[in-house]
Amino acid sequence: GVRIAGARAVVTGAASGIGRAVAERLRAEGAAVVGLDLRADPETVAVDVRDEGSVRAGFAEAVSRLGGAPTILVQSAGVFPVRPLDEVSVAEWRDTFDVNVLGTMLCARTAVGLARAAGHGLSIVNLSSIAAESSDWEEPCAAYAATKAGVGALTRAMAGEWAPYGVRVNAVAPGMIDTPMLRVMDDPAAGAETIRSSVPLARLGRAEEIASVVCFLASEGASYVTGTTVTADGGYRIR
Ligand code: NAD
C-alpha cells in the first residue's frame, strides 16, 4: 500500500504554487520528496516534462536521491495560457497540450515502469481543473480547458490500464487557487469582486487546501479510490 510516512514521492511543478505546497505537505507527513520542474533548486531537479529524455533523466536522478523507485507521483506541472480562440496560434495550442497532457503521460509511464521493475505499487495524483467542465470560465482559455478535460480522460484510462499492477490514478480539479498561475488573469481587483460573487465560499482557495486533497488521494486512506477526479473549488460548480 501507499502510505505517506516512509513514501518516496516525486512531485512535478514543485517549484511553485500547488506543487510546492504538495511537496511541503508530503515532507511534513514523513515522505521523502524530490521535485521536478523547469526551475531547479536543491530539492528540485531540472526537467522539462514535454521531453521524454529529460523526464527519464529526471526520474533516474530522483530514484537515486530517494533511494528507490517512487511510490507516489503528483503531477502539478502545467501552463495556463489565456487567449481567445481566434488568437491562439497553432504553436501555443500544441505547447499547451505538450505540457499538460503529453507531459502528464510521459511522467506517469516513467514512474509506473520504475515501480513495476521494483515490484511495488504507485499512487498517482494528476492536476485537472474546473475549467475542464465549466463553459462560462472567467477568462478565455479553451486550449487549457481541452487539456484539462484530457487529463481527466487520461486519469481514467491510466487507472484502468495500470490497476493490475497496483497502481491507483486519481485527479484533483481545483477552482481558483491563489498561486502565481492565477496572475495571468486581467484585473486582480475586479477579479476579487468576481470571486466574491461567483464562489460560494467567497474567497480564493489556498495551495495548501489543494495539497491536503492531493495527499489524501495519494495516501492509504484512499486505497479503494482510483480513476476519480475530486473537485476542490469552494462550491464554484454548484453556484
Ligand atoms: P504555477 O504556475 O504556480 O506552477 C506550475 C509549475 O509548473 C511552475 O513551477 C512551472 O515552472 C512548472 N512547469 C511549467 N511547464 C513545465 C514543464 N514543461 N516542465 C516542468 N515543469 C513545468 O501553477 P499552480 O497554480 O501551482 O498550478 C499547478 C497545477 O494546478 C497546474 O496543472 C494547473 O493547471 C492546476 N490548476 C491550478 C489552478 C489555480 O487556480 N492556480 C486551478 C486549477 C488547476
Image: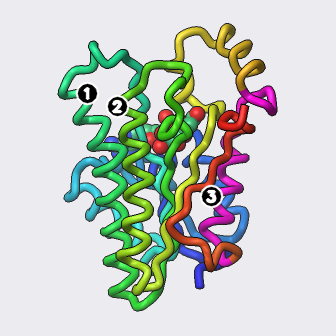
- Give the CA distance from mark 1 to mark 3: 28 Å
Name the front one of labels 3 and 2: 2
40 or 109, which is in the foreground? 109
Q: Which residue is mark 1?
A: 92
Question: Which amino acid type corresponds to the residue marked 3 in the rendered image?
Answer: Val
- Give the CA distance from mark 3 to mark 2: 24 Å
- Please state the total of marks drawn on the protein image: 3
Please provide the residue range marked out in magenta. Answer: 199-220
Label pair 2/1, CB-CB below 8 angstroms: yes
Q: Dot 2, how many residues are within 10 Å of its Cα: few (below 14), some (14-19), or many (20+)?
A: many
Name the front one of labels 2 and 1: 2
- Work out which quarter of the rendered image holds the C terminus and state it: top right
200 sits left or right of 26 in the view: right
Q: What is the quadrant of residue 162 in the picture?
A: bottom left
Q: Mark 2: which secondary structure?
A: helix
- Work out which quarter of the rendered image holds the N terminus and state it: bottom right
Q: Dot 3, how many residues are within 10 Å of its Cα: few (below 14), some (14-19), or many (20+)?
A: many
* Residue 143 numbered tag: 2
Q: Which residue is mark 3?
A: 214
119 or 185, which is in the foreground? 185
Q: Looking at the image, is mark 3 or mark 2 earlier in the sequence?
A: 2
Residue 140 x/y as whole percent: 44, 19
Above or below, comparing residue 101 to residue 74 in the picture: above
Q: Looking at the image, is mark 1 or mark 3 earlier in the sequence?
A: 1
Question: Which amino acid type corresponds to the residue marked 2 in the rendered image?
Answer: Ala
Q: Is residue 204 highlighted in magenta?
A: yes
232 sits left or right of 140 in the view: right
